[in-house]
């Protein structure tokens, strides 16, 4: 039986972070396109990524990758971990800027409008898909990129992200469909 390598090079995690942050952005843009019939660039940043998905995905990877053969356990743990990340992020963003980037107040079983049951279940399903299906696929694709290209891509992504984060620390992305004023 092949032992799974738990610790990977830094670029492994940077590329995984941006892949997951981009997938999260696609998910939210598509969701709001279906709901509002309009393109809405969701999130605090201007770029096509939502860091909360990247952070949540990395935490799932670090914490649960060894549980990939136990999808029901991964589901339950993903619900708890991702809902906690979402709640704490919402709290921090509101504390920092006085703005809410999401509000589940009208949803069934919500906690202070920061998380809700439907969102938790979706995060559980997504976390299970990530840990049990997508990470093994990523582990096969990652080594196919040369180290030089991985480094170049990481530096480019990080430079754009730092510039975007710097700009948005002063001028966060807000507006109709993006944020709600905190009350």
Image (cartoon, grey):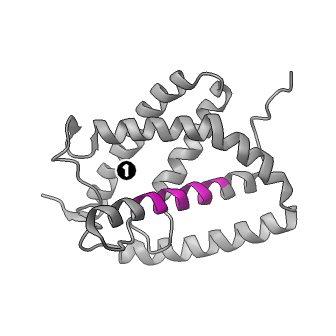
Residue at 15% of width from left, 47% of height from top? 106
Q: Judge whether residue 17 can be spotted in this image.
A: yes
The reply to whether residue 84 is in sight is no
Residue where numbered disc 1 is placed = 89
Q: What secondary structure is the stretch in magenta mostly built from? A: helix
Horizontal side of residue 153 vs 159, given as left or right? right
Q: Is residue 19 magenta?
A: yes
Q: Position of residue 180 (x, y in %)?
A: 21, 63
Which residue occupies the foreground of this view, 96 or 138? Answer: 138
* Image coords of residue 50 (percent x, y): 47, 61
State left or right for residue 7 relative to residue 61: right
Quick one: label 1, few (<14), some, or many (20+) residues within 10 Å? some
Asked if the magenta segment contains residue 26, the reply would be yes
Work out which quarter of the rendered image holds the N terminus and state it.
top right
Magenta segment: 16-28
Please tell me whether residue 134 is drawn above or below residue 93 in the rendered image: above
- 127 to 44, vertically: above or below: above
Residue at left offset 50%, top offset 70%: 48
Quadrant in which the C terminus is drawn: bottom left
Viewer-side residue, 118 vs 46: 118
Instruction: Report whether 96 appears left or right of 8.
Output: left
């Amino acid at each position: 039986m092949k032992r799974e390598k738990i610790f990977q090079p830094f670029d492994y995690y940077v590329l995984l972070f941006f892949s997951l942050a981009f997938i999260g952005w696609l998910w939210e843009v598509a969701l709001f396109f279906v709901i509002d019939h309009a393109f809405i660039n969701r999130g605090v940043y201007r770029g096509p990524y939502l860091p909360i998905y990247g952070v949540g995905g990395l935490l799932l990877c670090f914490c649960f990758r060894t549980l990939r053969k136990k999808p029901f356990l991964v589901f339950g743990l993903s619900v708890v971990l991702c809902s906690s990340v979402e709640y704490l992020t919402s709290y921090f963003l509101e504390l920092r800027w006085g703005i809410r980037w999401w509000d589940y107040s009208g949803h069934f079983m919500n906690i202070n409008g920061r998380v809700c049951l439907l969102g938790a279940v979706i995060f559980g399903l997504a976390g299970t898909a990530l840990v049990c299906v997508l990470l093994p696929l990523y582990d096969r694709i990652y080594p196919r990129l040369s180290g030089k290209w991985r480094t170049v891509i990481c530096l480019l992504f990080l430079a754009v992200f730092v510039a975007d984060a710097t700009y948005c620390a002063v001028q966060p992305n807000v507006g109709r469909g993006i944020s709600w004023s905190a009350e």
